[in-house]
């Protein structure tokens, strides 16, 4: 049985909603930090992994050439929630689900000359009683953001980034302002000694094509699962870049440079 590591996040649903288990393929669900570990250990065969984790372990891992969870500008689900201004942040609580976003946050703060203390913590906005800021990703970031919004605006230009004294800093938008590049949060990789079977890659591509072609159905399911409006979910999902195209690779290369790691530019030829 070939085991695929999948985060049960709405942002990845367009890739796996139409992917069927069976016929030699099974899913194992986890948050990105679990998937990263499982892939390296060998308890999943092909998985979405945090881009930072991949860059750190590029001598052991190799990605598919055309799969990513990336975006240009806002991502809406990698959010720093804080009451005091960005420049004054000192004590920050970090989601334990992410490898990439925590490193991105550290880079962005340091680039602005801000030295903060980071503490892994589980929870939501209640952490703001003890910390200056809390970093959330994935479904939790979306539902927390939605929980603060009293109305869903007609236009994205009206989505507030401060609500009832809580500021929402979208890390991907901050990255874009600094670099004008896309940001790659995740890639799909295998271990170097275990190339991806072409038939599995074919099934992944065909599921993605169905997912993106039927985004309303995917958004409907995910909106219901998370208890958010379909309109919000649909906008959230279409905004992602799922193909690791040339601009995304430039973004990944810039991220590697920003965090002092080599960019291997080395993908499976599949
Ligand atoms: C955009 C997101 O991307 C995820 C964030 C990751 C990380 O920070 O390590 C890893 C994989 C992505 O699926 C998100 O979860 O909101």
Image: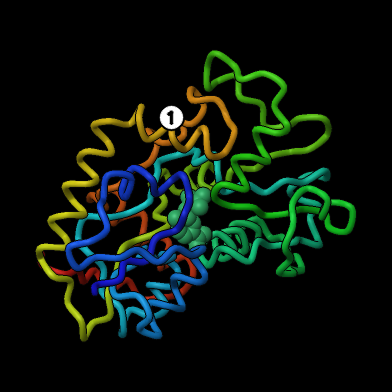
Q: How many C-alpha atoms fall within 10 Å of the one at disc 1: few (<14), some, or many (≥20)?
A: some
Which residue occupies the extreme front position in the image? 22
Q: Percent x, y for residue 139?
A: 56, 47
Q: Which residue is drawn at 66% across and 37% down?
A: 145
Q: Is residue 249 above or below residue 159?
A: below
Q: Quadrant of residue 219?
A: top left
Query: If the image is split into quadrants, where does the C terminus sit?
Result: bottom left
Q: Percent x, y for residue 199?
A: 10, 63
Frontmost residue, 242 versus 87 = 242
Q: Percent x, y for residue 144?
A: 68, 41
Frontmost residue, 106 versus 62 = 62
User: In the drawing, does residue 192 fall left or right of residue 9?
Assistant: left
Q: Which residue is drawn at 36% across and 27% down?
A: 216
Which residue occupies the extreme right position in the image? 129
Q: Quadrant of residue 162?
A: top right
Residue for badge 1: 220
Q: In this view, does 88 lie above or below 121?
A: above
């Amino acid at each position: 049985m070939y085991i695929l590591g999948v985060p049960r996040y709405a942002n990845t649903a367009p890739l796996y909603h139409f992917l069927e288990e069976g016929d030699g393929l099974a899913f194992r669900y986890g948050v990105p930090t679990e998937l990263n570990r499982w892939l390296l250990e060998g308890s999943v065969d092909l998985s979405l992994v945090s881009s930072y984790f991949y860059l750190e372990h590029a001598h052991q891992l190799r990605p598919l050439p055309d799969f990513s969870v990336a975006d240009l500008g806002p991502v809406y689900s990698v959010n720093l929630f804080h009451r005091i201004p960005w420049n004054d942040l000192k004590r920050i609580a970090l989601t334990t689900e992410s490898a990439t976003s925590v490193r991105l946050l550290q880079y962005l703060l340091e680039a602005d000359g801000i030295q903060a203390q980071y503490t892994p913590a589980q929870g939501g906005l209640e952490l703001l009683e003890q910390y200056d800021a809390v970093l959330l990703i994935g479904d939790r970031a979306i539902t927390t953001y939605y929980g603060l919004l009293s109305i869903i605006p007609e236009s994205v230009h009206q989505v507030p980034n401060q609500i009832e004294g809580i500021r929402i800093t979208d890390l991907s938008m901050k990255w874009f302002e600094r670099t004008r590049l896309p940001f790659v949060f995740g890639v799909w990789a295998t271990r170097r000694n275990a190339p991806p079977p072409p038939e599995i890659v074919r099934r992944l591509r065909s599921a993605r094509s169905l997912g993106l072609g039927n985004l309303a159905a995917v958004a409907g399911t995910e909106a219901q699962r998370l208890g958010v409006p379909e309109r919000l979910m649909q906008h959230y999902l279409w905004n992602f870049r799922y193909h690791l195209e040339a601009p995304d690779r430039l973004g990944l290369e810039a991220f590697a440079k920003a965090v002092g790691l080599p960019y291997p530019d080395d993908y499976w030829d599949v």
